[in-house]
Amino acid sequence: MRMPKPTDADRAQFAALAPDAPGVEVKPMFGNLGAFVNGNMFMGLFGADIGIKLPEAERTELLGQPGTGPFGPEERPMGGYVTLPATWEAEDAAPWIDRALAHAATLPPKTPKTGRRKTGP
């Protein structure tokens, strides 16, 4: 599976679009970026693509917009996520990103995984 690397401009655009809201954290993920609330990712960067996680009805609504599509690796897109059109300006994307944040905020908080490793036989 090929992991595209975002450019500095892609990272800057993602950071500019990530909501400045309580509990929102932007973290690196596999050479890309993710925006999280309560440990749940609601927005991600995969190469130059920005994807958001929405409930099914809103995801279907967004997929009706030209330029949207699956998010993540072509051979294994991330379930529940939609890529935002690359042509959208911040004011086009912001309402959808806010919806994704609101959705993720309703999910149960994720607990950090323990550092437990398997040992040999």
Image (cartoon, rainbow, N blue to C red):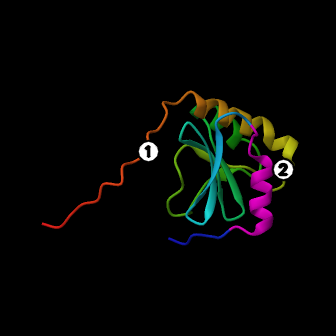
Please name the residue that numbered disc 2 is placed on: 88
Q: Look at the picture and state if 39 lies above or below 114.
A: above
10 inside magenta stretch: yes
Disc 1 crowd, CA 10 A, few/some/many (<14, 14-19, 20+): few
Q: Earlier in the sequence, mark 2 or mark 1?
A: 2
Q: Which residues are magenta?
A: 6-20
Kind of residue indicated by mark 2? Trp
Q: Position of residue 68 (x, y in %)?
A: 71, 50
* Res. 100 image quadrant: top right
At x 80% / y 39%, what residue is drawn?
Answer: 94
Q: Main secondary structure of the magenta part?
A: helix
Q: Position of residue 109 (x, y in %)?
A: 49, 33
Q: Position of residue 82 (x, y in %)?
A: 64, 47
Can you name the residue that lies furthest to the left here? Answer: 121
Kind of residue indicated by mark 1? Pro
Q: Position of residue 9 (x, y in %)?
A: 80, 65
Q: Look at the picture and state if 92 lies above or below 33.
A: above
| Residue 112, label in figure | 1
Q: Nearer the viewer, residue 9 or 22?
A: 22
